[in-house]
Image (cartoon, coloured by chain):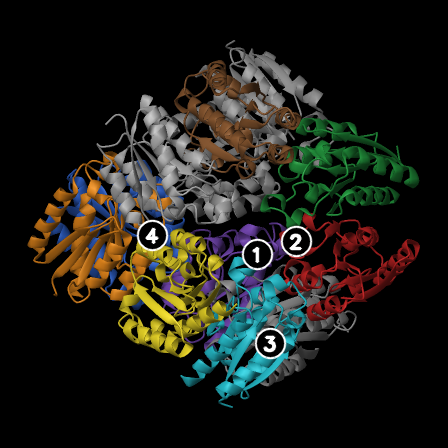
Chain colours: A cyan, B red, C green, G purple, H brown, I blue, K orange, L yellow
């Protein structure tokens, strides 16, 4: 279990590559996942990746991570700003979670400036496009060593 | 595709006709849908109608509208006031969406005065009961002509 | 009287067609009025149309509507956001008023997000350009039937 | 139907007994449910109990309670603070609902001080651990007698 | 001049007796004015009364009161809450002004709780229906004696 | 009972005439009370006057007014801004209360701009010095006639 | 001492049964106290009951509870929303306190939505009329067992 | 047209020289206008000057400036803080406007700190008494050269 | 009178030494008073000390200090944050008052950060435990010398 | 000293001409200073000009202006919005200061709308590019004549 | 080291005695420092005193106090209200700091009511003029004894 | 230049390893810099590192980075929350900046939740201790490749 990391993509991320490219870049979710897996291999960790548009499914996934994964990398997307349910799930399972965002949420609309996930995350990485995921995976691996 | 419009009813709207009639009127959702279809026929457009209480299912429906529908009429109901996930879905698919409400949300409780959907909608129609849907459908057809 | 509707254009709308076309479209007020009248004919209602830049003149017009008109369609323009005097006039005459806006006021500057008129209006239609007026007229006619 | 009560556990409550025990106590959800059933028997009412992490499923459950249950005891957990959809469902079915919380939400983080459910609930009980549910069941039975 | 008092009725007060009687009572403006004049006679002061719906006309009236009137009784109605222009006019002419309201503005909607006129008025009387004017006139006469 | 009015002076008003004369004038409470009694005589009503610095004593006095007095004139002084207990007492006994203030509280410090009493008072008179009480008594008598 | 519970009724509760019955029910304080005593007997605990309109007397009562009572049931009524003095007294004596309210304070005016007592109470029960006290007593007994 | 500038004085400025001299100085509006004209002559531009207390008249004046004036100098006085109608007129005619104030609005009461005109003005000059107008005229001429 | 100082302890301070020792230290009020008296002797001033849990009693004490004491040292405890009545009493008697707090109120909960007493006090000393009183007494003596 | 004016450029203004030209224009600081000096010569005043990125250096410069300069023209740039230290320095030396800004700060981001310098400045000029400095210099000379 | 105390004067305090004497008194910084040294001698502690207008220099001074001083007395002046950098320095070196202010910051402008330093200071003394420093020094010595 | 990166440590970071180790870890700034340099070598980029407690020096450093560095990694520490001057410098030089923080600023005090730097940064990394710098350096290198 020591080396298993769960990567969660929140709502609308399945549209990557088609949606507002100036904001999110042109890589599709498949391409991002491929890069994540390649890096995981290099870092000698296993990853499992899932995407869901349904808040409760994400809660379910986080809960069942217990005992199977040692860290999470999560991009909560639209749920970032109000899902106390996801926040509680992360706090409950006590698996360290790295919060990632493709765009710099702080230079976008007011409505995206506040994350209710951040206070229970181990840390946050935002604004580097696909690289946010790769840095997030490295950060997660860094946490495992402690 | 030019003439296909997706109509989405948000949470609790399946209870119409039973619920707080002084606020929402006595028409059931079936009766409303019948009126929508009749008007669609008259306006020579096709409509597809769906109702869901589950936020993520609505996100899924909006996403899969891409390439199949040219406009949407959406009553996000209770999700109007906090669902950044639905907002992102609408912005992502770039299909014009007309936001409709049965009641005048601005003369109700404070909690209903702010719509997170409005800034990404093409426009908003509120307060005309069943007629809000019919006017919304006309507005959507008007957008197709541009 | 049953079939008479008052249409009120607020301040600066006499400049339509010259002013910020990307926001308000290129139709002049004359063209809009012509369309309103054509639709009125079709719907078998009479309309009277007036434009004023002076807040108190609009209050006067709403007051004198009593007993002469059975509904109003009003675009309060700049006065939307602070005129308690117009709001009180609408509430006082108890003639149903449909609030219309050419643009989607909720996706513009902060200062335009709040309408003090909305809580006393029957409903609100915003964001469909000239069509907002036509949908507003239909909504008003719909209200007459109740 | 007179004596049937629906008990709803919101998101993450299935983790009880494993999660932050200093806050929520060490009883598992199974143990809590057993106590609820024992008390129901004693009070001569029937109970049905459900847990879900998915907001829309809870909305569905509340809706289908109509005609089958005469009161509800609900712990909306993380959804307490933003789910207007659940609030609307409760208001729509007009079955009295008792809102319960294991912990005293008013002595926790700012984000948990406001309940959007409370204004439509019959009443609220918070801070007594498992006992909150038992007192909530008694409160619900008390409401039936009116 | 010592004994001349200007009474100003703001926007929509010409509708008194027809408008929301539960809030404003059933007396018409004519009846109110008759009572004001009767009391003035009794108190041995002259009064001049005017009503206008136009903000700038009220500003003009206040300005031209200078040298002609020794006190004012003003019900700014809807302008109470935002007209810095009327406020400045009162401050500029330095004639003591008594602010009156038919209803208790503090027990109505939030939007009516703040008066921008009050800080420059000599005092405020609110909530006594027609009597507010009569008490206001007495208060104004009391100010003249100082 | 028809003609009996209770006058309540809140905390620190026993110091009148000694305290900040530029704000409150130079009349002592005894002198004010004498004027109140003289006016009462003239208006053919009985008055009973009391002053207390203790919040709960004022609550007690308001409660016991029931059945003995038909109106109240109250200057809640410092309690104006936070005493929900006094507010509840006034609302509970359902005797009309006239709130008075010697000074114009709206042109003083921010902390004095909000009255929690005002929403349950029949009306408010502020800014006329001793005359505020006399006008208040008249206002109370005016209320009795209704 | 183990089985002695102090019940405190705050300001204006002595008026119960006469005051706004639609909000508080028609039971008098005497009737409520009788029910409390009957339940106490059944639960095999002693109760002592007191009512006061004076904030400082309630502080005194809480302080002197030390060493004599093992739990408190308190309805702080109007003091709920601002009495830091009562809050400090509860925190100081370290006897668990159950906060109760007859009405659901969250569905009333804004001014009643915030309790300064709640963060130091063991828990809160609101909205069940007289039953709030009975449930509160049970909750208090439940706390004794821990 | 190149060299024609419209100078607008808002409400109450016709009282200059009589009104609160410590704030506004002792020059009358006539004297200010004389200085403006003298400077205009020197700078080789034509000016037209108008004063109005009526918000809508100012809107009319700004609108009719189109095609006749190449810049405006405007002191909106009391309307500065809420007139979205004047703001829209300025934005609509697209003639550069220099906002001027006699006093430093930022060192006066809170209510005067915010200008709704400033965001659509070319720039703002405040606090130099009569000189604010003269500097404003120079600023306007400077804008013409661009 | 020159050398007489009144020391006032607000609500719950009679519990010192028993209550939350980590915050307030382990000295009892008796011990504190002994230290105050010893220092007074050394500084050659007389002190009178009183403690009360009742807001109005403290107001009474401050009022009757007039002519008997030349300075006050007051720890308003829980009343610090809302008692405008105590604030007004201090302002009214015009005897310089030194506000003291055992703990550093600015590093505790939000609710304790604002003192309504501070603006009318001569100065404030907070955070030095028992020493706050001793420093406060010295500060008061320092004020006497002016 | 009568004719000596200090011109202060705040942080980042040394980058003018290279930085965001669409906002600040293409003139370099050297070119601006040359224009300031030319105008000074024409107005027969001496100027001394300094630029610093360090807040405390600007405070030092303002302090040492005392007795050497009779007015200041200051563009506090980024420090405009939070430097109470610069504000205090200006207030302390009592040399009139004209606050200038190249851009119209009121039509930029929210964070730039509030100036903490403005309340202690003699006046403010904003939005005219390089001309803001030249108008500021004239305004400063105008102040000297008073 | 036991007896060495660092006294820091923040920005603009070098102007004392020249600047707004009604607020800060007429003593110069030299005179204050003399009094501080005299008291230090009497109290048998060593003091080192420094004044700087530069935020970062004060940060440097606090940092280098580590190991050399056992307490600090700091008047952060204008930096009081926003310098998180100074706050962090104080928290980092863990030497107890007494925050002092000449004036009572709570009775001055809004902008001065909040101290970001206070939460990390040991305590705060404000409003006693020069005596604030002397009391501060005594407070600091009192802290050393613990 | 392509491969040169500037690393800036803000105020108080020179104390790392001595200061609040539970928050910031036990590594000294020297050790962190060593790790940064080792990674730089591995990534084949040059780094230059600087630390300053003085806001203006950091502004100077950012400005002079122009033409010499192709990216920055900056930990603004205490300045994060208010330095518009640093923000403007970053925006002005148009060199991409990666904002890093050792701790998760969003789970600390309120005062640290808002970054004024974030909107102009390329992205933000927070909460990974020393690893934040290493991930930041990688992020910066990633930006160079675009």
SS of the residue under disc 2? helix
Using the numbered discs, state the Cα–Cα distance from disc 4 to disc 2 in whole angstroms: 38 Å
Mark nearer the N terminus (1 vs 3): 3
* Chain letter behind tag 3: A
Look at 27% across and 61% down and name the residue there. Answer: K90
Would you identify the image quadrant in which residue K94 lies? bottom left
Look at 31% across and 64% down and name the residue there. Answer: L50
Same chain for marks 3 and 4? no
- Residue C29 position, x and y percent, is 77, 34
Residue position for label 1: A109
Using the numbered discs, state the Cα–Cα distance from disc 2 to disc 3 in whole angstroms: 29 Å
Residue at the far front in the pictured view? L1
- Residue B124 position, x and y percent, is 73, 51
Residue position for label 4: K115
Up-down relation of residue I43 to residue G62 (above or below): above
* Chain letter behind tag 1: A
Look at 81% across and 45% down and name the residue there. Answer: C135
Q: Is residue K135 left or right of residue I97?
A: left
């Amino acid at each position: 279990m020591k080396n298993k990391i769960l990567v969660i993509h929140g709502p609308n991320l399945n549209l990557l590559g088609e949606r507002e490219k100036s904001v999110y870049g042109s890589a599709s979710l498949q391409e991002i996942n491929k890069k994540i897996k390649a890096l995981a291999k290099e870092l000698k960790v296993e990853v499992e990746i899932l995407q869901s548009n349904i808040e409760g499914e994400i809660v379910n996934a986080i809960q069942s991570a217990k005992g199977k994964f040692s860290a999470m990398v999560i991009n909560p997307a639209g749920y970032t700003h109000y899902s106390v349910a996801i926040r509680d799930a992360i706090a409950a399972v006590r698996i360290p979670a790295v919060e990632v965002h493709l765009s710099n949420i702080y230079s976008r609309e007011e409505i995206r400036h506040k994350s209710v996930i951040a206070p229970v995350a181990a840390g946050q990485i935002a604004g580097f496009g696909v690289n946010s995921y790769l840095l997030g995976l490295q950060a997660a691996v860094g946490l495992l060593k402690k």
